[in-house]
Image (cartoon, grey):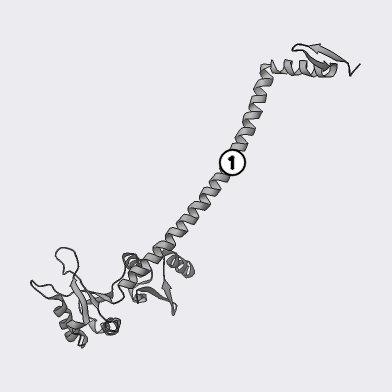
Amino acid sequence: MAGDRIQTRGSVDLTKEENQVLKIVEKLLSNETFIEKLTTIIDKNMCLAFETKMKLYDDKIQHLETQLQKSVNENNLYLDRLEQYTRINSLRIYGIPEVPTEKTDEVVTKMCKEKLDLDIPVSSMDCCHRLAGKEGQHRPIIVKFISRNTKKVILNNKRKLKNTKIVIREDLTRRRAQLLRNAAARFGHRSVWSNDGNVMVKMNSRIRKIVSEDDLRQMDLSCA
């Protein structure tokens, strides 16, 4: 009968049907072709499971990298704003001939008087000195004023320096100075300037503040 139990090796009681199944399994397990196919199927399934798992890990890592880069960019922008704020009263002056034993604060006062018709006393300056420059060229002067208004007055009159070799610019962070150069290369020097440390671009009668290279790329796209 189907339910009859029979004794098999290992003293385990099996029905005839179970015993037949056991024999079939043993026969299959002794078949090299079957074992080969079974191994291939198992390996394939394991690979698929592994690839799925790795895809999840890759997506998670990519997400974390994106979040980290975003955090780094935001932190860099914040530090850049802080650094620019420390330069808010400073100007850089290019093209003034350099002479031995000069006093740069007096040089700036003289330039303001002769070229800009402005009386800017030495006492209005917090510090003033030459910066590093290329060999054979007059080194630029950086001057930090006590009052921000003094800086603004000079900037408002710098148009009087037209047709001279003297150039006055805001003291920008390295990042903003590079952004200014890149903007000028794209849109022309006449359409690009800085205002209170911010890079400004005029395009199609519209003035925009440029904060990053992404802003420049967006403007490029709008021009296309």
Nearest the viewer among 218 and 5 is: 5
Residue at 38% in and 71% down: 187
Q: Position of residue 151 (x, y in %)?
A: 27, 81
* Residue found farthest to the left: 101
| In the depicted structure, whether residue 5 falls above or below residue 67 | above
State the residue in front, 212 or 23: 23
Image quadrant assignment for residue 189: bottom left
Quarter holding residue 149 = bottom left
Q: Percent from the top left, x then y, of residue 209?
A: 42, 74
Could you tell whether 96 is left or right of 147 in the image?
left
User: In this picture, is 168 found above or below 21?
Assistant: below
Nearer to the camera, 218 or 90: 90
Q: Quadrant of residue 50?
A: top right
Res. 188 in view: yes
> Is 124 displayed left or right of 71 in the figure?
left
At horizontal 44% and vertical 64% (from top left) the residue drawn is 214
Q: Is residue 167 left or right of residue 63?
A: left
Instruction: Name the residue carrying label 1.
Output: 53
Residue farthest toward the right in the current orientation of the protein? 1
- Quadrant placement of the N terminus: top right
Residue 16 x %, y %: 85, 16
Q: Total marks drawn?
A: 1
Residue 180: in sight, yes or no? no
Does 202 sit left or right of 138 as displayed? right
Per the image, label 1 sits on a secondary structure element best described as helix
Local crowd at mark 1 within 10 Å, few (<14), some, or many (≥20)? Answer: few
Question: Residue 171: x percent and y percent?
Answer: 28, 72
Q: Residue at x 22, y 85 (%)?
A: 116
At label 1, the amino acid type is Lys
Residue 153 versus residue 76 in the image, above or below: below
